[in-house]
């Protein structure tokens, strides 16, 4: 009798423990989905997530206390946008190309309200009705943008706090009388109180969205903001077409070395091997291209182009496709440009050796570059094969890759910013 009671007591205790464990596991599952119970999740950060559907529309979400490693965005407040291709952040303010409807060309300013929702905070319209407003936000009071209607060889200035135009810088002296001439249409960078701007002089053929330069080379104009004058125009051959789209930034300042890097895409329609896509450099303290430096896509894959760019501590981070690709509908290569063929790589700027990072492949539905935050570099990826849409972080000192988060039943990841408290 005593043995029977003892056995029942043991079994009851085991059942209670199992029930308690089960409840505890369920609680953890419920709390970790959009709930910050993971002690490794930073509590002093807000994650800004741009998600997108097949037509590029989507929402901009702000997650603070509801961050998790697997995020379902259903039911969360968001700002609806017709073009959800990511944006740029400055402190706690966000900026993106064009308004929420994507019908008005210009620069849209956004922030986070008291309820934690992304909201509009201002808009600077472009005079042009074409999709072409490149911009740079330097500080709360210093910004630059390009507006073809105001003059292709003029760079506009604006105040990001008031979202008002404040003047312009005239580069008309650089004109060569070509049908299409622009300054800063695709690249506006600042270093050491100098602006570095792409100078494009050429023409655009029917059926080709790229400008064909009059001379097969690329050029950067350097403007000294202290002296208020054009300091230099540096040119280099062997490639064409610096940058690609207005909201697809292809320049990067290495904050450690001070070197400036630029990516050229060449002619994306004909993909000539003698004018292939390259990564170029203007070293710290210089105003000329480094003639001894070029990273050529042909070293790793061809035909193909460099379509993402980030530099940190003499390393370059970009995607390299596993197969030849053509942007123009698969073209002669038979490979769709947005297949799962793009792999994140770290290229040593000295040896030019490329090392593939242990991350899911990407299909180029997001164009955002990696960024550095708190000792780690963050990378966005969408992979149909792996069913992955999210962010990975990489520690360049240890080489360790960790999944930051993935979206669950929430479309593609289109953009990601981190805002610190």
Image (spheres, grey):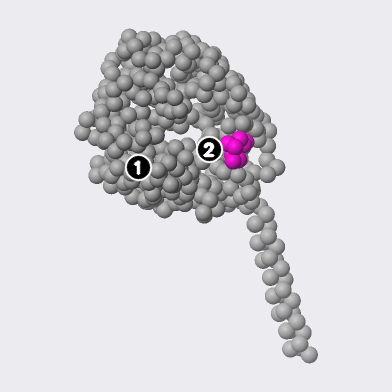
Residue on which the image places disc 2: 415
SS class of the residue under badge 1?
loop
Residue on which the image places disc 1: 303
Crowding at label 1, few (<14), some or many (≥20) Cα neighbours within 10 Å? many
Magenta span contains residue 53: yes
SS class of the residue under badge 2?
strand
- For the residues labelled 2 and 1, the Cα–Cα distance comes to 27 Å
Q: Position of residue 113 (x, y in %)?
A: 65, 29
Q: Is residue 375 visible?
A: no
Q: Which mark is residue 249?
A: none
Dots 2 and 1: beta carbons under 8 Å? Answer: no
Position of residue 290 in the picture relative to residue 381 (left or right)? left
Q: Is residue 212 visible?
A: yes
Magenta span contains residue 413: no
Q: Position of residue 34 (x, y in %)?
A: 64, 47
The residue positioned farthest toward the right in the image shown: 1
Q: Position of residue 341 (x, y in %)?
A: 43, 49
Q: Nearer the viewer, residue 302 or 388?
A: 302
Magenta portion: prevailing SS class: loop
Q: How many marks?
A: 2
Q: Specify start and end residues of the magenta stretch as a single range.
A: 52-59
Q: Quarter holding the C terminus? A: top right
Position of residue 279 in the picture relative to residue 341 (left or right)? left
Which residue is at 41% across, 22% downward? 204
Which residue is at 55% across, 21% downward? 105
Disc number lying in front (2 or 1): 1
Q: Nearer the viewer, residue 167 or 226?
A: 167
Position of residue 57 in the picture relative to residue 192 (left or right)? right
């Amino acid at each position: 009798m005593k043995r029977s009671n003892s056995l029942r007591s043991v079994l009851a205790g085991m059942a209670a423990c199992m029930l308690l464990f089960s409840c505890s596991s369920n609680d953890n599952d419920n709390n970790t989905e959009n709930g910050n119970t993971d002690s490794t999740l930073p509590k002093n950060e807000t994650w800004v997530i741009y998600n997108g559907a097949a037509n590029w529309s989507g929402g901009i979400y702000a997650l603070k206390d509801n961050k998790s490693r697997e995020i379902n965005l259903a039911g969360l407040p968001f700002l609806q946008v017709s073009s959800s291709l990511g944006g740029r952040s400055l402190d706690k303010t966000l900026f993106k190309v064009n308004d929420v409807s994507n019908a008005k060309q210009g620069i849209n300013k956004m922030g986070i309200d008291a309820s934690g929702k992304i909201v509009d905070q201002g808009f600077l319209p472009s005079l042009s009705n074409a999709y072409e407003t490149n911009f740079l936000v330097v500080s709360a009071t210093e910004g630059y943008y390009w507006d073809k209607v105001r003059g292709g060889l003029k760079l506009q200035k604006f105040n990001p706090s008031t979202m008002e135009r404040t003047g312009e810088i005239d580069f008309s002296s650089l004109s060569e009388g070509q049908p299409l001439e622009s300054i800063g249409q695709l690249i506006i960078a600042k270093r050491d109180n100098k602006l570095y701007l792409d100078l494009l002089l050429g023409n655009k053929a029917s059926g080709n969205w790229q400008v064909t330069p009059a001379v097969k080379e690329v050029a950067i104009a350097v403007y000294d903001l202290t002296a208020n004058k054009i300091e230099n125009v540096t040119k280099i051959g062997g490639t064409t077409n610096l940058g690609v789209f207005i909201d697809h930034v292809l320049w990067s300042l290495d904050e450690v070395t001070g070197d400036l890097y630029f990516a050229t895409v060449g002619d994306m329609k004909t993909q000539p091997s003698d004018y292939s896509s390259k990564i170029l450099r203007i070293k710290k303290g210089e105003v000329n291209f480094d003639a001894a430096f070029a990273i050529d896509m042909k070293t790793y894959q061809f035909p193909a182009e460099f379509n993402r760019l980030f530099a940190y501590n003499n390393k370059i981070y970009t995607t390299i496709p596993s197969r030849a690709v053509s942007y123009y509908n698969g073209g002669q290569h038979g490979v769709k440009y947005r297949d799962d063929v793009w792999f994140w790589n770290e290229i040593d700027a000295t040896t030019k050796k490329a090392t593939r990072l242990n991350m899911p492949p990407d299909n180029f539905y997001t164009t955002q570059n990696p960024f550095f935050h708190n000792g780690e570099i963050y990378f966005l990826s969408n992979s149909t094969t792996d069913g992955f849409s999210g962010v990975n972080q990489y520690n360049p000192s240890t080489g360790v890759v960790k999944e930051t988060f993935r979206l669950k039943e929430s479309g593609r990841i289109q953009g990601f910013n981190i805002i610190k408290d």
